[in-house]
Image (cartoon, grey):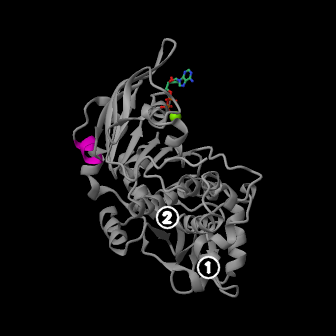
Amino acid sequence: MRSERLFDRITSIDIDHVTKRYGEVYAVRDVSLSVRGGELLSLIGPSGSGKTTTLRMVNRLIEPDAGAVRINGEDVRAHDPVALRRNTGYVIQQIGLFPHMTVAGNIGLVPRLEGMDPGSIGARVRALLSLVDLPPEHFMGRYPSELSGGQQQRVGLARALAMDPPLLLMDEPFGALDPLLRVQLQQEFSTIKEELGKTIIFVTHDIEESFALGDRIGIMRDASLVQVGTPQDLLFSPASSFVEDIVGGSRKLRHLEHVTVRDVMVPLGAGAMLDGDMGASDALAHMERLDLDTAAVSGRSSPGMVRLIDLYRAPTDATLEDVLRDVPVFSPSDALAPALRTLRDAGLAAGLVMEHDIVTGVVCMDCMVLELLS
Ligand code: ADP
Ligand code: MG
């Protein structure tokens, strides 16, 4: 059955005085929120504050007891729920790939159900895998059990994008990943987001993540929305002490000049430091086994970093020395602000930290934002 294309672009999503109760418990209580076309609105709040319920009322997985949700001015109840969901990408933490289907089968599932022709589906699957940094030739035929956690999450995102929905709903999509991988995926996602120009509602309980990704941030507490604004609004004009506590860092932010690289660096995990003479294919096997997306490399002249994606593309006889990416190297005592500018000017997400000629950690743009807020 082919679903109708409900909207080509989103101009607005209006959540209008919406309430959802379970018995005596309000999951969401009189919440009003407008999302603009093309923005990423991040919903953040403690567990049980009503984030998931709010999100699921947008694609009618949950129906409100009172109030209405309108997309482009039209009440979502006017749309068939199945059509609405096929016009909306939905990404959750437990991505739920079908284990008996290959990666290509999983991503192409809805396009198949929608009757898209096989040639177009194949082309679409390849394009989406490239978009999420998984080389199609290596991944189309794999099964979910042959993927790391981060790779599964990427396939989940590709699947959600299969029908090119103008609206993406994401519920803690990176919540189960380890911190470095999470930062990596956030960084990639932030690039994809710019490329796609979609409207996104992104639920998280992680303030760092919401600051890294959100154009605006909505803060929820006890079934209510307590403040919506840009990161700057929340930092400098918190509406309550609760918001101040969640955002936390305004005092620290004003003292940026005293923060050093040491304060924000992430220590290198076990096995994440590789020798430049190592063969690229050995390194690939090693990193896949440890579920590492990025590793540091001690090169002949200076250290660098290597990403899994570089290794898939490397010639079979390459060594890590051949494929490493040069990155800025900092010392723990370096002031953070200039380090931040160096990374930004170089267009890089991360740099290395060296102490006494030994690489001991990684410093990344997002880690800095995160640390400033903690
Ligand atoms: P969050 O995503 O912010 O953690 P939820 O939207 O999942 O919060 O839940 C908000 C509140 O509603 C919680 O107190 C939760 O226990 C309650 N709740 C959510 N779904 C149900 C349900 N199906 N039955 C009963 N209570 C529910
Ligand atoms: Mg939730």
| Residue that mark 1 sits on | 313
The image quarter in which residue 308 lies: bottom right
Q: Give whichever of 334, 244 is nearer the camera.
A: 244
Q: In this view of the protein, can residue 279 be seen by the observer?
A: yes
| Residue that mark 2 sits on | 362
Badge 2 marks a residue whose secondary structure is: strand
Task: Indicate whether 41 appears above or below 268.
Answer: above
Badge 1 marks a residue whose secondary structure is: helix
Label 2 neighbourhood size at 10 Å, few (<14), some (14-19), many (20+)?
many
Tell how many labels.
Answer: 2
368 relative position to 82: left or right: left
Identity, as a three-letter code, of the amino acid under mark 1: Arg
At a point 69% along the width and 58% down the height, the residue shown is 105
Which x, y percent locates residue 246?
37, 37
Instruction: Point out the stretch of residues depicted in magenta.
Output: 231-236
Some atom of ligand 2 lies within 8 Å of the CB belonging to the residue at label 1: no
At a point 68% along the width and 71% down the height, the residue shown is 138
Identity, as a three-letter code, of the amino acid under mark 2: Val
